[in-house]
Amino acid sequence: MATLTLNPDEPQKNDILNFIYNIKDKAALGAFYQLMKNQVTSKKHAATQAVADDGDSKEYILAGIKHACRDLKLIREGKVRGVEVHEFLRQFDDED
């Protein structure tokens, strides 16, 4: 079992970690994880949003490739669940 040492200089992080540790409901923990992941990744991609207006800039394309590679790595490590192709394509069929 891993051991986590809390840093007294970061009380907010310590409170968050204690809160997460005390969550017993797996569904609530999963929902909390997705919420936090979305919050963190949205801030990381805020820089690319400024360039996203044209969508053709080199920076925007490279940022998209970097994001896709990071997602693939997380999927391979089992930290994130990937979306099956038929599920992904179904969202486009539903828009019609």
Image (tube, rainbow, N blue to C red):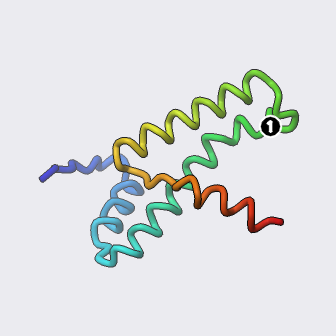
Quick one: which residue is furthest to the left in this view?
1
Kindly identify the residue that appears in the image at 32 percent across and 73 percent down: 23
Q: Residue 4: percent from the left, percent from the top?
A: 21, 50
88 to 61, vertically: above or below: below
Q: Residue 94: percent from the left, percent from the top?
A: 75, 68
Q: Is residue 24 left or right of residue 58?
A: left
Give neighbour class at mark 1: few <14, some 14-19, many 20+ (Cα, 10 Å): some
Quick one: which residue is furthest to the bottom in this view?
25
Residue type at numbered disc 1: Ala
How many numbered marks are there? Answer: 1
Q: Is residue 95 left or right of residue 16?
A: right
- Label 1 belongs to which residue? 52
Kindly identify the residue that appears in the image at 70 percent across and 36 percent down: 47
29 to 1, vertically: above or below: below
52 to 2, vertically: above or below: above
Q: Secondary structure at mark 1?
A: loop
Q: Nearer the viewer, residue 94 or 52?
A: 94
Kindly identify the residue that appears in the image at 60 percent across and 40 percent down: 44
Q: Residue 71: percent from the left, percent from the top?
A: 50, 41
Q: Nearer the viewer, residue 82 or 20?
A: 82
The quadrant of the picture occupied by the C terminus is: bottom right
